[in-house]
Amino acid sequence: MSAMTHQHLNLAGIVLAGGRSRRMGQDKASLDFQGRPMLDTVVDVVAQRCAPVLVTAAQTSAAYGQLGESPNYQWVTAEEAGTGPLGGLVAALDVAAGAGAPAAFVCATDMPLIEPELIDELLRALTPSVDAVIVRDGGRDHPMAGIYRTRVMPTLLGLIADGELRMLSAVDAIVTHRVGISNPRWLTNVDAPEDLHRLRENAG
């Protein structure tokens, strides 16, 4: 799996897959989307620009239990229990730093319509003084569509220690640049069964 170097930056990929999927009623990572698990669809896109590709979920999660090991990505299961997406992000950033990547593109497993161009657009906005670049669309921030530098780990660990687990609090605690993107469709996420049905119908 080869990484694309853009602006001389080696970029890891992080897919957050540890959610409980309450509204969906079942694990979203293993949901069938166009004949394969949704996670595989997302990983294939991320891998076009990033290496390694890291997937975060607790060992006790449905995602890890149902999908198991894969040659296309590396599971990161070291997140502290009860810390949510932020805990998964910190655990994966640590692995990314160990692999020599100074930054990582981060997305969720329920975003099957992302394209490599989303990563390109975010990367172009990542200046040296910025800790993170995230999408802002429709008047709201999308912290799970962004690029984060590994150097933010101490700040994020401090938030977790204080019991502040919201991703929006994380992007407010670091130097974050918010950008619009050319295709908001990339941000489409699958939260409930009706969302999945709608995507399947549109694809058909």
Image (tube, rainbow, N blue to C red):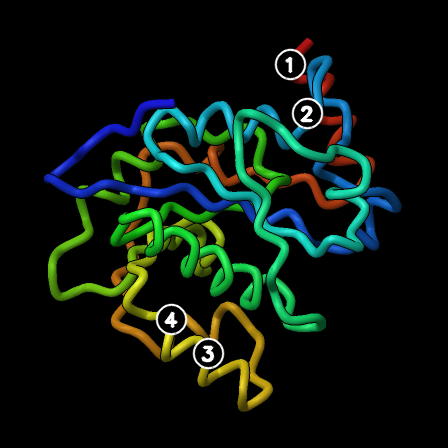
Q: CB of mark 4 within 8 Å of CB of mark 3? A: yes
The residue to which callout 1 is attached is: 203
Q: Residue 166, how many percent across, how many down?
A: 56, 73
Residue 138 seen anywhere in this rendered image of the structure:
yes
Q: Residue 38, how many percent across, how many down?
A: 67, 29
What amino acid type is highlighted by mark number 3?
Leu
Q: CB of mark 3 within 8 Å of CB of mark 1? A: no
Residue 139 seen anywhere in this rendered image of the structure:
no
45 with respect to 100 (left or right): right
N-terminal label among 4 and 2: 4
Is 78 rendered above or below residue 135? below
Q: What element carries label 2?
A: helix
The residue to which callout 3 is attached is: 157
Q: Residue 56, how many percent across, how many down?
A: 59, 50
CA gap, disc 4 to disc 1?
Answer: 39 Å
Q: For the residue carrying disc 1, how many other residues have a C-alpha within 10 Å: few (<14), some (14-19), or many (20+)?
A: few
What amino acid type is highlighted by mark number 1?
Ala
Q: Residue at x 29, y 59 (%)?
A: 149
Residue 199 - label: 2
N-terminal label among 3 and 1: 3
Q: For the residue carrying disc 3, how many other residues have a C-alpha within 10 Å: few (<14), some (14-19), or many (20+)?
A: some
- Please state which of the two labelled residues, at mark 4 or mark 2, is closer to the viewer: 4
CA gap, disc 3 to disc 2?
Answer: 36 Å
* Viewer-nearest residue: 113 or 84: 84
Q: For the residue carrying disc 2, how many other residues have a C-alpha within 10 Å: few (<14), some (14-19), or many (20+)?
A: some
Q: Is mark 4 on a helix, strand or loop?
A: helix
N-terminal label among 3 and 2: 3
135 with respect to 27 (left or right): left
